[in-house]
Amino acid sequence: MSLPATRPSMTFDERYRVIESRDVRFDGQFVTAVRTTGIYCRPSCPARTPKPANVSFFATSAAAHEAGYRACKRCLPEAAPGSPHWNLRGDVTARAMRLIADGVIEREGVPGLAARLGYSPRHLTRLLTAELGAGPLALSRAHRAHTARMLLVGTDLPAADVAFSAGFSSIRQFNDTVSEVFGMPPLQLRARRRGIHPASSAPGTIELALPYRGPLDAAGLFAWMSARALPGMEAGDARSFARTLRLPGGAASLRLTLDDSGRVRLQARLATLSDLPMAVARARRLFDLDADPLAVDGALARHGELAPLVEAVPGIRVPGAADPHEMLIRAMIGQQISVAAARTHLTQLVDALGERLSVPDGGGAGAAGASPALDRLFPTMAAIAEQGPEVLRGPAARVRAITGVADALATGRLSLGTGDDWAEQRAALLAMPGIGPWTADYVRMRVTGDPDVFLPGDIAVRTGAARVGLPADAASLTAWSTRVAPWRSYLTAHLWRALASIPSKELS
C-alpha cells in the first residue's frame, strides 16, 4: 500500500485498505466503528476485519462515543499516540484540539476555549461537530477518559486520585464515563492491565509511559535539551531530561527518560493532581511525540540531497516548548549569539529572578540521581519586566525589547499560546520592538508545533545546507525548501543536526 502516513482527508476505500492491512502508522489518526458489535477500534486492531457494510470511520474517539460506540478492549484505541493532524493544520479545528489537549476546557470551560479562538461557544460547537462529529465538551470528555485509562493501567494511584487527576469533577462522573467509554468500570479496567508497573520513583511522583510513533531520534532530543539546560531549573544527559515549570496548580517538575525497551517514560511531580493532563500534554509537545515520522522521513528522503540525512537520523523530531512565554524570552536572548552564550545569559536570569522552590526536586538527570537538585522556576514575566534591566546584559535596545515583551505578556497586551492562529501570532510578534522574522518563526515552530517553518536567516541552517549540497544563500535555499512542504520544520531540524559537532549560532 502506498498511502502516505499522514493525510488530512481520506476516502472510505483508503481507510478500509488501512484496516485490512492493520497499518500501525494510522493509529490515532482515525477510529473504526463496527455497527454489529457497537465497538470502535484503532486501525491496527488484530481482530478480524469487519465487512465494509458494517463499518463507519470517525476522526476522533469522541465522535464514536457520541454515536454510541465503546472502545475495543483488545486494541485499546485510547492508548494510541495523538493525531499529527492537529499540528499539521492551522485551522480552528486543529487549534481547538491543541487547546483541549492542554486542558483549557477543564480550566476555563467552553466559553474560555471559544474566546481564545475568537468564536462564540455556540458557533464553535457547530464547527467542531460538523467536522469531527463531536462538540468541545464531548472532545474534552474523551480526553479525560484517555487520561483516566492511562492512569488506571499505568499507575497504582487510588481510583479517587485517578478521577481528579484526569479532570473529572466527581467520582460518579468518572465511574460513569469510564464504564460508558470502555464497557467496564474503572477497577475492572485496571485489573486487565498487563505486565508489572513499578512504584513511583519518589513519593508524590506519578510515572507513565508516553506512546509515540516510531522511529524516534531520542539521542537528538536529549542532546538538544542537554545543551540548552539551565542549571537549577533543567538537567539533561544522553537518556534523560528534567525540568521545573509553573502549572495552574503550582510548581511542578517533569523528567523524561528512555528506558531499555525504547519507551519514553514521564515522571511528574505535581502540586495538585489536576495538573497531570496539562503536564502530559506539555511533555508530549516538548518531545514532539505526536509526530508522524514515517510520513516526514518518506517525504524528505525522496530528495537525493536529504536521503543520507534521513538514513542517518530516522525519526527526527522538532523540540517543542514547555511554556510559550518562557520560549519567547529564551529566543530573544539567544538570537544572534551561540548556544553557550545564550545559556550563560539565561542561567544568570534564572539565578537572579527565578522563584525558589520550597521543596527542591531531586529528579535531575542521571540514573543515580546524583545531579544537583532542581530548585527554581523560570522567572515570571512580571519579574523580568520589573527587574530585568538590573540583570540582563547586552545592548540597551535589546534589554528594553526583552523587558517590553515581558511586560506585554504579563499584562495581557500580547498573548502567546499553542492554539494561536499561525499568521496572527507571527504578525503580533513582529509588531513588538526587537522581534524579527527569525525569532517570530522560531517561536512559532516550537510553540505551535507548525511543521512547515523554515529559517533561512539562521546561520546554522545555511551552513548545514551547504554541507549537504543545498543552496547556501537565503533566497535560493528558501526556494528549494518549498519542495519539502509541509515538512520544512523537519528539514530545519535535519540541517541543525548535520552540524551537531560544530558550534552553532542563532539557536536558543
Image (tube, helix red, strand yellow):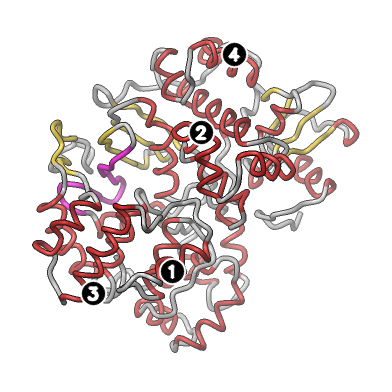
x, y percent for residue 364: 21, 41
Mark 2, other Cα within 10 Å: few <14 / some 14–19 / many ≥20: some
Q: Name the image quarter holding residue 480.
A: bottom right
Determine which residue is flagged by label 1. 441
Please name the residue shown 34% across and 72% down the image.
435
x, y percent for residue 205: 29, 27
Magenta-highlighted residues:
230-247
Q: What amino acid type is highlighted by mark number 3? A: Ile
Left or right: 257 in relation to 337 = right
Residues at discs 4 and 2 in contact (Cβ within 8 Å): no
Does 341 appear above or below 156?
A: below
Which mark sits nearer the N-terminus, 2 or 3? 2
Alpha carbons under labels 3 and 1: distance apart: 17 Å
Q: Nearer the viewer, residue 106 or 450?
A: 106
Which mark sits nearer the N-terminus, 4 or 2? 2
Left or right: 39 in relation to 235 = right
Residues at discs 4 and 3 in contact (Cβ within 8 Å): no
Q: Nearer the viewer, residue 225 or 70?
A: 70
Alpha carbons under labels 2 and 1: distance apart: 30 Å
Please name the residue shown 72% across and 31% down the image.
64
Predominant SS along the magenta part: strand
Q: Which mark is residue 109?
A: 2
Determine which residue is flagged by label 4. 176
